[in-house]
Image (cartoon, rainbow, N blue to C red):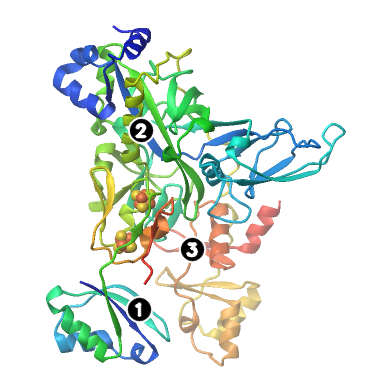
Amino acid sequence: MFLRLRFDSKAVRKPVISAVTLKTSALINIIKAEVGPRRGELIVEVDDSIAEKVEKAFEELGVEVLRLKEKVERNERCVHCGACISICPVEAIVLQDGRVEFLDKCVLCGNCVKVCPVKALKLPTT
Amino acid sequence: MKSVEDINEKIREGSVCVVTAEEMKEIVKELGAEKAAEEVDVVTTGTFGAMCSTGVFLNFGHSDPPIRMQRVWLNDVEAYTGIAAVDAYLGATQQSEKAEDYGGAHVIEELLKGEEVELKAISKGTDCYPAKEVRTVITLEDLNFAEMVNPRNAYQRYNAATNSSDRLLRTYMGTLLPNFGNVTFAGCGEISPLNNDPEFRTIGIGTKILLCGGKGYIVGHGTQHCPGYATLMVKGSLKSMDPEFLRAAYMPGYGVTMFVGIGIPIPVLDSKMAEKLAVRDEEIKTKILDFGVQRRDRPVVREVTYAELKSGRIEINGEEVRVSPLSSVYMARKIMEELKRRIERGEFLLTFPVERLTPGKALKPMKTAIKLVKSVMSEAIVISPETSVEIAAKIMIEKGVNHLPVVENGKLVGIVTSWDVAKAVAMGKTGKVGEIMTKRVIVTYPEEAVELAAKKMEENDISALPVVDKSMRVLGIVTSEDLSKLLAR
Ligand code: SF4
Ligand code: SF4
C-alpha cells in the first residue's frame, strides 16, 4: 500500500522513517521525497499487512498520513499514443490490446502528466 | 488481375470485399497471396501520429474597407501572409506569442470544433487596400476556404530515439530519460500505408485518402521523401474533417505539433500486391539514434525492428530498456475501420494515381560552416587541488585569466573562478583550492559544435568550459569571450 506522509517543521527534523522502522520493523520503500526546511512530503510503500501499525506510528510522531487509493486521472483527449509509458517509474502504464491503461499501482508521481502531448492527464486534487 | 474500375463497380454494387491491413496479413498467411488477391478487393491502411509538417491555407474574405494583410495572427499565433491579400498559411508548429504550449495546431483544432478564433491583421495600407488594421472574431464557417495542405506526412518509418547523456532531454521524440533510460519511436509499422505499397503502385499523385476523417488527396511525395523513408504531401478540406482524427499536441520543452490521422485504401490488383500487403513488423527495420549527441549525424545505437519496438522492451548494451510509442495504433485501427465502413457503404470510391511517385533520392545535408570547439579553444592553465588560494589568485592576475581548471593525477577534478577566489578571500578562507573549487564541472569536448558549447554556458549561467577528452584529461578551455568574438564575426 502507498501512504502519503506530510510533516511540518517540527517533525521534519526528526528521523521519522528510521523511528517507525525500528518500532514496527516494517520495510518502508520511499517512492518519492520532497523535503524542504519547513515541511516535507514523502510517498512510501509498505506491506498491506502492517500498514495500520505503520500509519499509527507515523501519526504518533506528528506526521499526517493519507492512504493513496487514487491514480492519475485521464480525460477524453488521450489518443493512446503511449508517450507516457516509458516515463512511469513503477510501470503503472501499460498497453492492453492497443489501448493505454493506467494500473492501480500508480504512485501519483506526476511524471506522466508532464510528458503527455495532449494534456490528457492530471493528478487528483486532494 | 483486377482494375480500380472493376473494384469501384463492386463498391457501387455493394459486393466489394474490404479488410483492414491487420486482417489482410492473416488472410495472406492462411490462403496465400494468390487466393488472397482473388478474395480481397481493398485493404485499408492507417496511421496516426505527430506530424509537424502540417498546416492550413485560409481565405478570410475581404473586410470593408479592404486590407492587404501583411501580418495576421489567429489567437496570437502568426500565419504566413506572403501570398495574396486575404490568404494565409497557418502552420501547425507555429507558436503563440503569448503561450509556450499553444500554437497553430491548437487554432486549427479549435476552428474544426466550431470555436471562435480572434483574428488580428495589420498592413501599411495601399490605394486599393486602404485598411491598416483589422480585428475580428472568426469561425470555420466564416472562412471561404480552409484547405489543409501538409508538405510531409505519413512517414513510412522513422528513426527511434534514445539518450546516452546524463541529462534528461525534451525533444520532438518526446522526453528522453538520461543514461539510455528509455526509447521512443514513431510510426505504426505494418499497418502504415507506405509499408503496404512500398513500390507506390497505387499510392501516387491523385490517390484519394481519408485525411483527419475527411476526404483528402495525395498531392505528391512529401518533402524529404527518400528511399526507405517515403513521405507524402497531402491535402483536404478542413471543413470535411472530424475532430476525433486530429489533435493539437505539445511536446514539453520542444514545442507544438499536431497528431494527424491518415487512412489510405490499397486496391489489391494482383497477387504481387497481396504479397506486399502481408508485410509484418518483424521485417520493418529502423535505427535507434542517440539524441545525447547533439549533432546532425547522431550515432546509431543499434538497428531494431518495429516488432521489437512494439514489444515495449528492447535491449541496449545488455540492459533492458522500456519503449514508448509516439504514434497511436489504437487510433490507426479506428481509421482503418472507418475507411472500411465508408467503402462498404459505397461512400468512398477509389482512384488510380495520375502519376506514380518516384523512390526519391538520398537527402543532401545543409551546407553550413560548422565550427568545432577544438578550433576556438585556448590553452588552459591548470592547478592542483593542493594549490593555495593565494597562489591561485596570483596566477589569475599574472596570466589574465578568470578560470583555472583543477587537475589531479592528470584528470579534471574541479574548477575555480576569480569569483570563487574573491569570495574565499572576502570570507577569510585562505586554505587550499580543493576546498573552494566547484566539483561538478560542466565540460565540452574538442569535437563538439561551438553552438552547443555556447548553449551549455548559457543554460548553466557560466562563462567558461574546460575542454576534455574521454578520460577527463584537460585539453584546453573555451570562454564566453572567445565565443562572442567568434559569433560576432
Ligand atoms: S501520453 Fe497522453 S495521449 Fe499519449 S497515451 Fe499517455 S495519456 Fe494518452
Ligand atoms: S503519476 Fe503517472 S508516471 Fe507517476 S506513477 Fe502514476 S502513472 Fe506512473
Instruction: Find residue A36 and report its horizontal and vertical position in percent.
Output: 41, 82
The circle drawn on residue A41 is 1
Q: Secondary structure at mark 1?
A: strand
Q: Label 2 crowding class (10 Å Cα cut-off): few <14, some 14-19, many 20+? A: many
What is the three-letter code of the residue carrying label 1? Glu
Instruction: Find residue B127 and report its horizontal and vertical position in percent.
Output: 87, 33
Q: Which residue is mark 3?
A: B443
Q: Nearer the viewer, residue B105 or B326?
A: B105
Residue placed at 47% from the left, 69% from the top?
B441
Nearest to N terminus: mark 2 or mark 3: 2
Chain where mark 3 sits? B
What is the three-letter code of the residue carrying label 2? Ile
Q: Nearer the viewer, residue B133 or B390?
A: B133
Answer left or right for B135 relative to A55: right
| Nearest to viewer (mark 2 / mark 1) | 2
Could one spot residue B195 in this view of the protein? no
In the figure, A62 relative to B474: above or below? below
Residues tagged by mark 2 and mark 1 found on one chain of the structure: no
Q: Label 3 crowding class (10 Å Cα cut-off): few <14, some 14-19, many 20+? A: some
- Residue with the most extreme right position: B127
